[in-house]
DNA sequence: TTCCTTATTGCAATTATTATCAATAACAAT
DNA sequence: ATTGTTATTGATAATAATTGCAATAAGGAA
């Protein structure tokens, strides 16, 4: 992948190492978009990697800001390569998705800070809702 | 519990039934606030209920709007009795919590609707951030 | 009350996810 | 290249969560 040297460097600076397993998982996410741990495992199983390594590695890469984690239905997680900070808005009826730029949440952050003194972590949210197509159909 | 007849009626209208297991779980949540499935099980284990029933029942009650589900660390879920729609803001450092009334998200809902045409589901969010006490400590 | 229907539970088997620990392999230093 | 340090992986076990199905029981009807 084009960004391999950069990521390797990033890990080294923190005393971590780049490994074939980590590269394979990054490649899988590069090809696959956002994937659950199980889906990632399917894509890398050919390499003989243990499933437990997939879980650990996804967690590790997310800790280090290389992946974003997002909550899917009933507490299941999905991972994707970290790009510019953004969020998802997904239609609960048809599944259509749009991305939201990071700034879309800034007013909320400011408002909550004023009201409560809390500074919100704007990590990577996935919101659910109704898209413009499905909205009229709902009653 | 005071609201048992109301909930029983609610389920009945939809063709479902009130059972001792469901009551015990509701009672546990009434006493315990937000609890994970495992915590709920500990509180009802004396009744001889299977743990699998706890999972299914929590899911069922949440489906029916009687409980709120919220995402805790790394995809683990917690359940609580549904009250007036609200949200949580929890400090990632010290764990301090404040509640947000439903209306706190209205501006976000409106803004997203204008921008994208999507109507956000304002269910029950748990946001993470830094509370006023811990905020100054973070560099 | 008794009977029927079928939602619900118990039970057992599967599938996810996390933890432990010894063996391995990155990679900096020699 | 070789070596040494230690982050990382494999392998296994433990725990958490889900699923399928037969037995049970809630609650409407007789």
Image: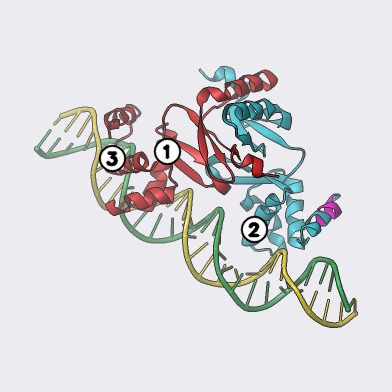
Chain colours: A cyan, B red, C green, D yellow
Q: Quadrant of residue A17?
A: bottom right
User: Which of the two discs, 3 and 2, sits closer to the camera?
Assistant: 2
**The C terminus of chain B: image quadrant:** top right
Query: Would you place residue A135 above or below residue B12 in this image?
Result: above
Can residue A101 be seen here? The reply is no
Query: Would you place residue A132 above or below residue C30 in this image?
Result: above
Horizontally, residue A20 falls left or right of residue B69, namely right
On the image, the x and y values in percent for residue A12 come to: 80, 59
Q: What is the span of residues highlighted in magenta in the rendered image? A: A3-8
Horizontally, residue B57 falls left or right of residue A132, namely left
Which residue matches tag 3?
A: B19
Which residue matches tag 1?
A: B80
Name the chief secondary structure element in magenta.
helix
Task: Kindly report the distance in space between the C-alpha atoms of the residues bearing marks 3 and 1.
Answer: 18 Å
Specify the subunit that label 3 lies on.
Answer: B
Judge by depth and name the residue closer to the eye, A34 or B31: B31
């Amino acid at each position: 992948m084009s960004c391999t040297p950069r990521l390797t460097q990033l890990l080294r600076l923190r005393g971590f190492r780049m490994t074939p397993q980590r590269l394979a998982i990054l490649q899988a996410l590069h090809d696959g978009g956002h994937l659950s741990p199980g889906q990632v495992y399917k894509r890398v199983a050919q390499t003989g990697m243990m499933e437990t390594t997939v879980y650990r590695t996804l967690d590790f890469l997310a800790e280090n800001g290389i992946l974003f984690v997002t909550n899917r239905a009933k507490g299941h997680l999905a991972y994707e390569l970290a790009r510019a900070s953004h969020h998802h808005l997904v239609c609960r009826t048809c599944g259509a998705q749009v991305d939201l730029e990071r700034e879309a949440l800034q007013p909320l952050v400011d408002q909550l800070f004023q009201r409560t003194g809390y500074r919100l972590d704007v990590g990577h949210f996935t919101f659910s809702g109704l898209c413009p197509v499905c909205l009229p159909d709902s009653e």
